[in-house]
Image (spheres, helix red, strand yellow):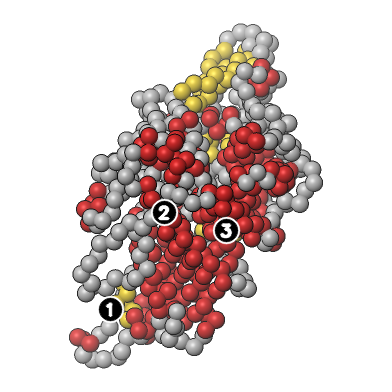
Amino acid sequence: MKLKNNLRYISLAFVGLLTSCNDDFVSTEPLDEVPQELVWADPALAQAFVFEIYNGFGVGGFYEQQMASMTDEAFFTHPGRGINTVTESRSNAADQGYIMDTYSYGNMYERIRASNVAIQNLRNPQFDDKDKANALLGEAYFLRAYFYQQLLRFYGAVPIIKKVYKLEDTDFLADRNTYEECVNQIVSDCDSASTLLTGLAKEDGRASDVAAFALKARVLTYAASDLHDVPTAKAKSATISSYSNPEFLGYVSGNRAERWRKARDAAKVVLTKLDYAYKLDLTAPATAEEGTANYMDIAMGGGSNVANVDGKKDLILGRFFKDIKDERGGWVGRDNGPNGYHNWSGNSPVQLLVDDYEMRTGVKFSWDNAAHKAAPYTNRDPRFYATISHDGSNWKPRTADVAQRDPANQIQTGRYEVGSGSGTKRVIPGLDTRNSPIEDWNGSYTGYYYRKFVDPNPRIEDQNTRQQIPWPLLRYTEAVLNYVEACIELGEEAEAKTWLNKIRFRAGMPAITDAGAALKDRYRNERRIELAYEEHRFFDARRWMIAPTTLGRKVTLVNIFGALKPGKTVAVYKYDPNNYTYTYTVSNLNPGIENRSWNDKMYFTSFNRDEINRNTKLVQNPGYQ
């Protein structure tokens, strides 16, 4: 049997060396295939096979359409690509809506099969380098666990396939395993991976023992959550309550406190790996400037020349990008940057997210507070400024054709008066709006732009230059937050606050002192802010079962108007409170563009109808036909 397309980047010249020199054309070996017996007898080829499995990571979350736009973090500026199907709860078995490659049912099983092939052959390697074989086997176990985890948190329980099907097999039908069985399998693979990978040097983009620990902690945290405790989920959702197979959705019985203890203990193992802790040893809040810089350092993951490369420490496992490959992951700035810079404004932050950033003092922001309303972008959580570009934000130099319109290099998302505050004046649209003279069709609807993973290096002109910021698949800080959540659920509030405040101090925010339900709410908002745009909100809002009051909300945006103060004269607009009085009005997005709503069937993604027709044992999720 030939293994096709699993060694795509082995050069044809190298493969050609494996081809016998034979004048008989019929006996010539194909140049795009390597016989299985050669792959597993050669450590270099075996490594190449395992390395190719990592391509299941895709470009991480750096697709043009990001999962943030299916949550209350962002709105995708260019509708009609399946996102509305999800946000408006119109998904069904025939039209699931937008699904990223990294959660695609078929894609994940393709990678799981490749992992199974590797595991099967590396358990008893045919080459002499035992250490190499064990390391590759550990990676294969991790990868299988990771891809099953992607399926589990997206669809609920799925069939666990550990055998390698062959062409001569006749039965390809597979029962859907229970949710508990899926969790147990993933945890088992993580344990196998961590054992085999212990002591090996960390390499960018490759699994490690700490990555296995962190993945295990994530899976166990999810497993203990409301959505996956069937009695709790039934009490909160009539759709789930009426489902005849709740064992596919979560634990139908058992000790939930014990599940939280397992989640806590798994996360605590990660916390002991202090080499991954970035500035979590502060005993008081950093300055506001330091807090913004610290957060940017982590987001840049060592990939920017204008950020502290030590921020990469927080990255347990990342998807890295290189100049030699023209991958979409390098075009995040172009995909999401302001139209006034000739970028595409893809996943624009929504006002709902902006409003959840606290004031620097730790007080909740409120539009009912006159001081907050007058200057909504002043003295906010320092992470806000490293995550979102707002009206008046300083940014990179404009391109030559726009520079004279904005010599100050500031984001312009409002309407402003120019001329004389005492005489003739006119209103102009900001350069980064949908009425801009620069590519107005790419302007943000919301009044904000994505900044978190965009390299601020002014030498990187986003629409023309690839960046090298890695996507965070697993972060140390996520493990800290998982530990905090488990501690809160177990009543260990002092320990929870100790670790939560370590994150806040790093961000330049004051300690929290809340208790009980208030502490849980504060933690959830902290997680929302710290992990913004990292694909967590989509799942967190579901597993906490708060989606109806969060993801189901209408998109909100801000309208900004700058009125010239009396006696002031401006020829070329620049953000300046000395010259202008600014007013901010929050409103809903036009429902004709997107009309968000929530239906409880959306707690889990439907299986595609074709997949159900292929595997008649695959039971559909609740609420879908």
Instruction: Give the residue at x 44% y 44%.
Output: 230
Give neighbour class at mark 1: few <14, some 14-19, many 20+ (Cα, 10 Å). few
Q: What residue type is labelled 2?
A: Tyr
- Mark 3–mark 2 Cα distance, whole angstroms, equals 20 Å
- Helix or strand or loop: what does disc 3 sit on? helix
Q: Quadrant of residue 601?
A: top left
Disc nearer the start of the sequence (2/1): 1
Q: In this view, does 254 lie above or below 590?
A: below
Q: What residue type is labelled 1?
A: Met
Give the x, y percent position of residue 138.
51, 72
Q: Quadrant of residue 317?
A: bottom right
Instruction: Give the residue at x 63% y 11%.
Output: 421
Q: Can residue 407 be seen in this view?
A: no
Q: In this view, does 69 lie above or below 297?
A: above
Give the x, y percent position of residue 50.
44, 71
- Mark 2–mark 1 Cα distance, whole angstroms, equals 34 Å
Q: Mark 1 points at which residue?
A: 1
Instruction: Give the residue at x 25% y 52%.
Output: 612
Q: Name the residue under label 3.
A: 214
Disc nearer the start of the sequence (3/2): 2
Q: Nearer the viewer, residue 216 or 138?
A: 216
